[in-house]
Amino acid sequence: MFQKKDPEKINSDTNLLGISFKQSKKIQDFLIKSDFSWSNDCKPGPVMNETLVLYVDNTRARKVVLLDEVKVLLEIEKKTGITLKSIDVQISNSQQ
């Protein structure tokens, strides 16, 4: 009546939301070690569909990151080998 089926291993890098946990971790490590002037004011979030989500503490940091977006994307690609299309900069919930 019941067929025995082996459990299926869950691949955490393949999900319906498009979140890449491996890329998120690589980029988080890169940003922690980076020397961008705003890196202390931000917290890296997930990589979703080739877009990096960054949470910043204030609007000044948000504006600075948006001005440096192309430079940041190029540095991430050069240092980690991950190609991203854009950066979504959001003010963290605790600061809104």
Image (tube, grey):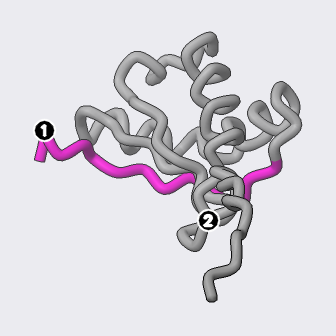
Residue 96's place in the image compared with 34, above or below, is below
Q: Residue at x 69, y 46 (%)?
A: 70
Q: Reply yes or no: does residue 87 show up in magenta.
A: yes
Q: Residue 11: image x %, image y %?
A: 70, 53
> Residue 81, labelled with which disc?
none
Q: Which of the 4 image quadrants contains residue 85?
A: bottom right
Question: Disc 2 on helix, strand or loop?
Answer: loop
59 left or right of 80? left
Q: Residue at x 13, y 38 (%)?
A: 94
Vertical relation: 55 (above or below) 25: below
Across and down, in percent, residue 89 comes to 42, 50
Q: Nearer the viewer, mark 1 or mark 2?
A: 2
What amino acid type should be assigned to the residue bearing mark 2?
Answer: Asn
| Residue 24 appears left or right of 22 | left
Q: Residue at x 74, y 53 (%)?
A: 84
Across and down, in percent, residue 27 comes to 65, 32
Q: Which residue is mark 1?
A: 94
Image spot of residue 86 (x, y percent): 63, 58
Q: Earlier in the sequence, mark 1 or mark 2?
A: 2
- As shown in the figure, which amino acid type bears the numbered disc 1? Ser
Q: Is residue 22 above or below residue 50?
A: above
Residue indicated by mark 2: 15
The magenta region covers: 83-96
Compared across the picture, whether 11 is left or right of 90 comes to: right
